[in-house]
Image: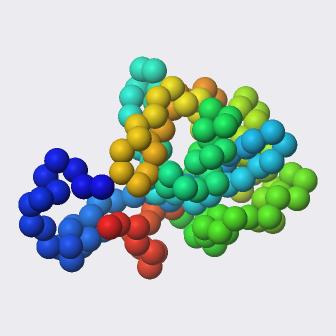
Amino acid sequence: MGGPLSGMSMDPKARKQALELVTYGLYVVGTRRGDQKHAVMVNWLTQASFDPPLVALALMKDALSTEMVLASGDFSVNVPAADQLEFAKTFIKRPRHEGNRLGGYEFYTKTTGAPIFKDALAFVECKVVAKVDHGDHLIFVAEVVDAGVHREGGPLALRGTKMHYAG
């Protein structure tokens, strides 16, 4: 599954080290399918346009979150505070959904019906407008349809944690 230059020689260790130097935030993406709610910790997310406001999100093709975004056509992005690594890490594995809680954290819904966590600094709700299917992740381009700020603070970033997500 290589790209157009896949026949070229590349040092895999150097590639991994270089890609780990790219800076990322950590986010909790909320998804839904009918009454089922889910959330996953991600770091491949970026703003992609001012007008209209767009974000680009990459999710593993075989993940439950990807299935649910494909089914619903929308998702929420919850921005954890710099001191909320444990909150974000809750969503590395499939969180338990009980009532208005996922992984023990309370959420509510607004425009899209995707979970918005009260503990997050801020949120944006997004409607998918395009998909890019290339490689092992599916890239969703989505328009921001609602947003809010719960409180002030700095966002959680991958750098500074002992976690890495690069290949």
Residue 126 locus on image (x, y percent): 59, 33
The residue that appears at 29% across and 60% down in the rendered structure is 22
Residue at the far right in the pictured view: 99
In the rendered image, which quarter contains the C terminus?
bottom left
Q: Is residue 155 visible?
A: no
Quadrant holding the N terminus: bottom left
The answer to whether residue 31 is left or right of residue 47 is right
Rendered location of residue 139, percent (x, y): 44, 42
Q: Nearer the viewer, residue 37 or 160?
A: 37
The residue depicted at 51 percent of the width and 32 percent of the height is 142
Identity of the residue drawn at 12% across and 59% down: 7
- How far across and how far down the image is residue 56, in percent? 44, 39
Q: Nearer the viewer, residue 71 or 116?
A: 71
Residue 20 is situated, as x and y percent measured from the top left of the image, at 30, 68
User: Which residue appears at 22% of the width and 50% of the height?
Assistant: 3
89 or 36, which lies in front?
A: 36
Query: By what rule are the colours in the image chosen?
Result: rainbow
Q: Residue furthest left?
A: 8
Answer yes or no: is residue 40 visible. Answer: yes
